[in-house]
Amino acid sequence: MGLAKKSASSSLILMIGQIISTVIMAVASIFLARKLGDEQYGVYAIILIPVSIMFLIQDLGTSPALTRFCAMYRHEDRQGDLREVVRTGLIFVSLISMALSLVLYFLSGTIASAFLHRSEIGGLLEASSFMVLGSGLYGAIQSIFVGYERMGLRSVIDVFYSIIRSALVISLLLIGLGTWGALLSLIIAYTMTGFLGVLLIIVFIKPSRGPRSQNSLHTLRLMLAYGFPSYVGSFLTGGLSYWCNSLMTVYVSNVLIGNYSAALNFIVPISFVLVPIGTTLFPLFSKFNKNDPQLRMVFKKSVKYASLIVLPVMALLILISGPLIQVVFPRGYTDAAFYLSLYLLTYAFEGLGGTSLANIIMGVGETRIVLWSSAATLLLGAPLALILIPRFQIVGLVASLIIAPRLGWLIQYMWVRRVIGVSVDWVSSARIYICCVISFVSGYLVLSLLHLSGWIALISGSVVFLVFYLVALPLSRTLSKDDIINFRDMAKIMGPLSLFFDFILSLLQHLTMAVQ
């Protein structure tokens, strides 16, 4: 259980950084959306579509490879090979990112007219190409820090990026630069964060010299051999999203795209949990072989603990989506609450394996399974989106993103069950779902019967939901004494906040003991 606790502690360190950086970014994003309005915010979102495609292309599997080989070589104390992995990965990613940045710059006019069907934004797209290089470097450095299990450094660069980006976007919009200012803030923030990350590697990581068993070319081949199937899988999975986005630019107006993009700003509370958990599980699973019995235990615990937080956050956000949008955007964005509620359903399957499935498969080195599942998702999702988006627009887009990945999940789950012999704790997951449903219905009845709105609805709905959820967990026997002990150990690293979490856990412990 020691490895699981260490992983949980690492997740909490990342979560703290994630919360700080996301709160800062949320303020800037809300300011940006309110300042631009739904029409121009839709244009801004459209410009970022080809940029995000370049972000996806530039990886080539180096991110998971950097994480896995850094974690593995550290565990095996192969210092020379470890240094070579870091150096080769950074150089390769920088060269690829630079090349893609130039490609986007010179093709921006064609992309704006032929792909985005908005030739007037060609100049903005040219400017956006410069953020590709900094983004590639930033991503590679994040993977290295995770592989070294230096989650504190990962959090430092995340918080630094959010501060620089937020300060710039607010300042540039206040002086009237509009969409140009929003893009410029991204370019500068990515570039500065990339250089800071390199400096942190030199100062704090200090890859040691030592005997090497492989040169740079062999290291690159090894990284690509491992990471490329995963990359193709990610590209195919991301390909569904980008295929949907490309159809969106054809069939959906700028105003509705702006509403949809504004809604996506409010899914960040779920990333507080999923990003740290997914990030730390991969290097943790990489330390086991397929037959290790401890791997099965860690997998079940990871699914349970992620579900205990992700599922109620999802249900709570759906409950308060109306008053939340009403409070944040008093003018415009009339469809954002509905789009937010609909999109949140993409997280409803966390209790069925969710984040942990792909991480355990990649951790044991079977990246081809991720590739197959991603291909299946795209093969189902692409024609589905082509049918649904022209007819139902944003609703059709989100429906495609909910339905298609279920085929990929089925492939991954069946493989994990057959080869590794591990399964989800179905009883535990069912109890968590029931607790969420009870809490949601209770909150919904209070808001509906009392006709609450605005801040009162936002606060009242949240309080009612959380009270019912915290009571339902021990009453349904979802939490065990060991679970509470583990959560107490995790909460110790939360500093002053640990007192609050300790109080909540004490209440849960008393309720748990009372019903057992």
Image (cartoon, rainbow, N blue to C red):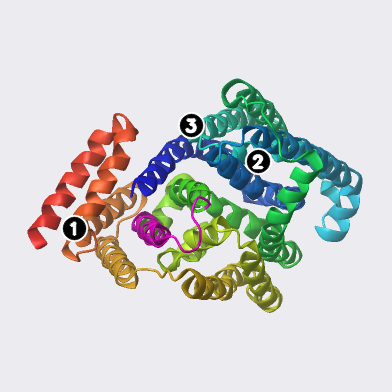
Task: Tell me the amino acid under the disc marked 1.
Answer: Val
Mark 2–mark 1 distance (CA, rounded to whole Å) = 40 Å
Q: Residue furthest left?
A: 514
- Upstream in sequence: badge 2 or badge 1: 2
From the image, tell me which residue sits under label 2.
139
Mark 2–mark 3 distance (CA, rounded to whole Å) = 16 Å
| Secondary-structure class at tag 2 | helix
- Labels 2 and 1 touching (C-beta < 8 A): no
Q: Which residues are magenta?
A: 286-309
Relative placement, left or right, of 211 versus 106 is left
- Upstream in sequence: badge 2 or badge 3: 2
Q: Is residue 298 magenta?
A: yes
Where residue 430 sits, quadrant-wise, is bottom left
* Percent x, y of residue 237: 65, 64
- Upstream in sequence: badge 3 or badge 1: 3
Compared with 142, 264 (above or below) is below
